């Protein structure tokens, strides 16, 4: 207990309010996200039978979706360039981003799109990163923490040093990943990494080339977020 006065505009309290609001929203099939308007944050859930994700499916059993597999954001067009002038209620940033995710899952050879659901919340652009960070810290989804690359976009022309992401190694099938170099990672390595993650054990380090590429792709995704 603290004697400090409650400040509703404290950054943490604002983040918690965003989290509470999105979790109060009804989930919908990820495949039906195409009609969403606006920009904001989203939470994706999995209820399928891919063995490595059994803890996630168990946490979402009976339609009681409580354990996200991935959390992300969609910034309004021009949001990073135009700052506070962007209107988060307009445009199709969320629909576009979720459509990309649905396409990725649909192309994967070992995942079924109908096993994924989503909650979303349209948020004023200045609070979108804060809401995403809060949700990730609360839930620590496996695709945010242990298996990188789900949120990757088509990198365009193949780069000589660009490998398939860990997500593409574990869930092959995305068309754009075919043009990337084979990774030094194996599915077995990644399955062990997932098992260790759910068990609370330290994760095996990614090879330096893969780790460096992942960090670069995350920075690039941030820089190009409003072009999604």
Image (cartoon, rainbow, N blue to C red):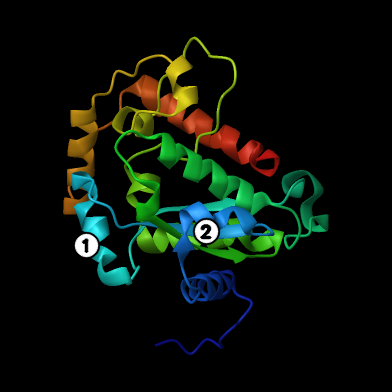
Q: Quadrant of residue 204?
A: top left
Residue sitting at x 44%, y 29%? 174
Camera-side residue of 95 and 205: 95
Judging by the rendered image, the residue that carries numbered circle 2 is 42
Judging by the rendered image, the residue that carries numbered circle 1 is 58
SS of the residue at dot 1?
helix
SS of the residue at dot 2?
strand
C-alpha separation, residue under disc 2 versus residue under disc 1? 21 Å
Q: Position of residue 56 (x, y in %)?
A: 27, 57
Q: Seen from this angle, which residue lies furthest top?
A: 160
Report whether 72 appears left or right of 139: right
Report whether 1 appears left or right of 202: right
Q: Considering the image in quadrants, where does the C terminus appear?
A: top right
Q: Answer yes or no: is residue 162 visible.
A: no
Q: Which mark is residue 2?
A: none
Q: Position of residue 5 (x, y in %)?
A: 56, 88
Q: Is residue 193 above or below residue 207?
A: below
Q: Is residue 101 above or below residue 115?
A: above
Q: Earlier in the sequence, mark 2 or mark 1?
A: 2
Q: Quadrant of residue 2?
A: bottom left
Q: Position of residue 65 (x, y in %)?
A: 35, 68
Q: Residues within 10 Å of mark 2 (few under 14, many from 20)?
A: many
Q: Position of residue 44 (x, y in %)?
A: 43, 56
């Amino acid at each position: 207990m603290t004697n400090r006065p409650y400040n509703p505009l404290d950054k943490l309290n604002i983040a918690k309010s965003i989290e509470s609001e999105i979790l109060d929203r009804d989930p919908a099939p990820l495949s039906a996200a195409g009609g969403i308007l606006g920009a904001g944050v989203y939470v994706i859930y999995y209820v399928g039978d891919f063995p490595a994700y059994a803890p996630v499916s168990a946490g979402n059993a009976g339609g009681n979706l409580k354990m996200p597999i991935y959390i992300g954001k969609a910034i309004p067009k021009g949001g990073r360039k135009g700052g506070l002038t962007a209107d988060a209620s307009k445009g199709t940033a969320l629909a576009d981003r979720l459509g990309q995710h649905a396409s990725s899952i649909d192309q994967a050879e070992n995942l079924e799109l109908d096993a994924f659901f989503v909650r979303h919340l349209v948020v004023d652009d200045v609070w979108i990163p804060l809401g995403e960070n809060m949700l990730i810290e609360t839930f620590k989804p496996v695709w945010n923490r242990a298996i990188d690359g789900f949120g990757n976009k088509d990198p365009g022309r193949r780069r000589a040093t660009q490998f398939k992401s860990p997500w593409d190694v574990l869930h092959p099938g995305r068309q754009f990943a075919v043009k990337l170099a084979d990774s030094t990672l194996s599915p077995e390595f990644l399955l062990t990494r997932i098992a260790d993650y759910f068990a609370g054990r330290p994760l095996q380090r990614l090879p330096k080339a893969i780790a460096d590429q992942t960090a670069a792709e995350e920075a690039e995704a941030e820089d190009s977020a409003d072009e999604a």
